[in-house]
Image (cartoon, rainbow, N blue to C red):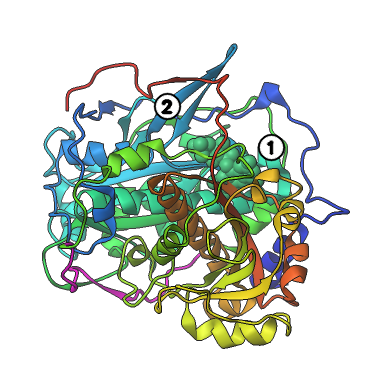
Amino acid sequence: MDAIERIIGYHERSKHHPHRYALGPGYLDWANQPDPFRRFAGCELVPLMLPDTDDTPPYEALFGPGAIPPSAVSHRSVSRFFECSLALSAWKQFGDSRWALRINPSSGNLHPTEGYLVVGPELPGIPGPGVYHYAPKEHGLERRCEFAANVWSAFSARFPSGSFLVGLSSILWREAWKYGERAFRYCQHDVGHALGALRISAAMLGWRLTVLEGMGDESLAGVLGLDRGEDFSGVEREEPELLAVVWPSGEAGEMARIVPHEFVEGVRAGRWMGRGNRLSREHVEWDEIDAAADATRKLATEPSPCRTVETRPGGDEIDRNGPTAKQIIFQRRSAVALDGRTGISSETFFRMLGRVAVIGDPACVPWDSIGWPPCIDLLMFVHRVESLNPGLYALVRDPRRVEVLRSEMKTEFIWTRPKHCPNDLPLFLLYETDCRQGAAQLSLGQAIAGDGAFSLGMIGRFEESLRETGPWFYRRLFWEAGMVGQVLYLEAEAAGVRATGIGAYFDDAVHDVFGLHGRRFQSLYHFTVGTAVEDTRLQTNPPYPFVRPG
Ligand SMILES: Cc1cc2nc3c(=O)[nH]c(=O)nc-3n(C[C@H](O)[C@H](O)[C@H](O)COP(=O)(O)O)c2cc1C
């Protein structure tokens, strides 16, 4: 069986059906709950700063091209970059239980995603060129590798000045512990959320960020030290996911989305330090997860070029009195319950959708961080949006797909434009109906899918994408869905409501509702937005109880 058949096989068997859920552990083995914090013993920990003043730009400016002047790359700005992307956002407490929340969301709050930084010699406050693992609990960087300055030159000669690298990996066991076979999907959603969080944090500093999509996973593992058997002996391995370059926007030019071979080899040959900690005492082997990871590993591919400077001027129309980027980023939380009453205005609804629709130029935040055209569309359940009839709607993020979807979906769908919908928003009313109960049922009976203003299924252009691009594109479909989710989370906060990602739904039942058959399109992630009911029993404490200079 080839890798495409294998990953399609995994996708099919990890579906939830009303009569059969995807295979899971059946119960929660609390004694073996994975430690959410990876540390490497024997590494120097470099503290990052925690600036006590909020000097971040308005949230609205994040999406206006050129609206934020680039910050110099420094210890302080790199600290801010991690603080607003992968750091802790709060500690929660209920009785004797205490758990951390983070800037990036995660299925089951299990946080399989680990972050890395690769920098050169010119960063005061950071000990020198090397590979650093980000430790969110301490808000610090563990120096995993030290390499020579000339190794860095092989990288820096090909990228704009001030460039550095960030990497992401997944510890698949963290999600498999709770979710079994479906967990590989959740890890990939989480990578998408983390990538979205990194891109938005970079935008806050006036920086660009793009995934080095030409890289193969073997090189990625080499740069991040994930293939070093001795450092992970007897502990949970990390699956390489992506490497992205970050640079202060300004210098015009073009770059290839790949690092040179001599850089990879130079880093590999550096002085490596530290051994990973063990996260669970015992493990359950999930062969299907390993097989899914194996089938979707990527080889090096011809990278597409990336323009290093924005060509669109903008930012003049931004309201500078609104909430800051940090305020919105830090207040993001998943709603545990929605009130089943309150709606939103159509203006708010259209604005939120506009942020995920990729209207006009694809080079806008955060979509400029991925090198492929939009493959995810939104099939929506509208419940409570003022002046919009409740029913099924479609937001087609690539207008070239409207006719394809129209011909694939139910013939009774009407495909009309909602009243007052902006001309450039590719939103269509498909069918008027009260879908509150249906939406909840599709999400394994989770009331949040019916109790909000709207919920949605993210439908991916599935089998054709895999056959045209490669089995590794499976992961990227989930990354894109996670990024859509990340934008919706923040947009919900900015609109005074709240969102929740929904990974648990009956896949084929969703397809049936819209009349989709076969594997041309598949539902890859669900989401809900509405007015949250707070759980007042929980105590909230600050993310870092210590003071650090900023
Ligand atoms: C991929 C993904 C899937 C999720 N699925 C569900 C879900 O099915 N039901 C639910 O109530 N919450 C779901 N969540 C929300 C998580 O439980 C939440 O992100 C986590 O508890 C951390 O809380 P926070 O988002 O407030 O930081 C999901 C989140 C993600 C990122």
How dense is the environment of label 2, judged by Cα within 10 Å: few (below 14), some, or many (20 and up)? some
- Quarter-wise, where is residue 546 in the image? top left
**98, 67: nearer the viewer:** 67
> Residues in magenta?
298-315
Give, as a three-letter code, the residue at label 1: Lys
- Quarter-wise, where is residue 523 in the image? bottom right
Q: Position of residue 374 (x, y in %)?
A: 46, 72
Residue placed under numbered mark 1 in the picture = 178
Q: Give the mark count.
A: 2
Compared to residue 40, the image places residue 453 above or below, namely below
Q: Is residue 184 magenta?
A: no
Q: Quadrant of the C terminus?
A: top left
| Earlier-in-chain disc, 2 versus 1 | 2
Q: Position of residue 20 (x, y in %)?
A: 86, 52
Q: State left or right for residue 218 relative to residue 316.
A: right
**516, 342: nearer the viewer:** 342
Give, as a three-letter code, the residue at label 2: Ala
Which residue is drawn at the image coordinates 72% and 49% (left, top)?
181
Magenta stretch prevailing secondary structure = loop
Kindly tell me whether residue 131 is visible in this rendering: no
